[in-house]
Image (spheres, rainbow, N blue to C red):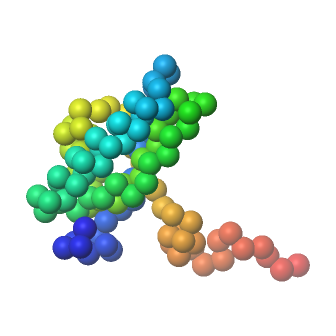
């Protein structure tokens, strides 16, 4: 996303739960999503697959994207030919702290 301002992107967490899906298949899905995101980025869209996490015990795949909109993430899924259970805007721990109201999350002195 070098050509796009990082301040104009949002992080999105995408969840996939597929009972009976092998770790190998989940890895292949992650590769397809990475390729779709890279293709969209080459076309000028602000999107990047930041991280994928496979949870073998849950037969699930969690993906974190940085993108200009949820619609761009959905486009990547369409190109990859994959579906998901849920997509949510997400904050990293550093972002959550910087966006918290003053005094939030702090203990009060007695």
- Of residues 96 and 101, the one nearer the viewer is 96
Q: Residue furthest left?
A: 43
Q: Position of residue 27 (x, y in %)?
A: 41, 38
- Of residues 86 and 48, the one nearer the viewer is 48
Q: Position of residue 45 (x, y in %)?
A: 17, 60
- Of residues 44 and 100, the one nearer the viewer is 44
Look at 14% across and 60% down and name the residue there.
42
Q: Residue furthest right?
A: 110
Q: From the viewer's perspective, tell me whether residue 61 is left or right of residue 103.
A: left
Q: Number of numbered discs present?
A: 0
The N terminus lies in which quarter of the figure?
A: bottom left
Q: Is residue 16 above or below residue 39?
A: above
- Of residues 75 and 23, the one nearer the viewer is 23
Q: From the viewer's perspective, tell me whether residue 98 is left or right of residue 13.
A: right
Q: Quadrant of residue 86?
A: top left
Look at 72% across and 74% down and name the residue there.
106
Q: Is residue 40 visible?
A: yes
Q: Is residue 48 above or below residue 53?
A: below
Q: Is residue 72 above or below residue 102?
A: above
Look at 11% across and 58% down and name the residue there.
43
Q: Position of residue 100 (x, y in %)?
A: 56, 71
The C terminus lies in which quarter of the figure?
A: bottom right
Look at 29% across and 70% down and name the residue there.
8
Q: Residue furthest top?
A: 20
Q: Quadrant of residue 58?
A: top right
Q: Position of residue 67 (x, y in %)?
A: 29, 59
Q: From the viewer's perspective, tell me whether residue 75 is left or right of residue 94.
A: left
Q: Is residue 71 visible?
A: no
Q: From the viewer's perspective, tell me whether residue 26 is left or right of residue 94.
A: left
């Amino acid at each position: 996303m070098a050509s796009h301002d990082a301040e104009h992107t949002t992080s999105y967490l995408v969840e996939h739960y597929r009972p009976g899906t092998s770790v190998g298949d989940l890895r292949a899905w992650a590769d397809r999503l990475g390729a779709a995101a890279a293709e969209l980025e080459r076309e000028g869209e602000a999107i990047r697959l930041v991280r994928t996490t496979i949870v073998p015990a849950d037969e699930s795949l969690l993906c974190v994207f940085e993108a200009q909109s949820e619609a761009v993430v959905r486009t990547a899924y369409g190109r990859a030919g994959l579906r998901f259970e849920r997509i949510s805007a997400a904050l990293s721990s550093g972002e959550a702290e910087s966006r918290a109201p003053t005094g939030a999350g702090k203990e009060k002195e007695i």
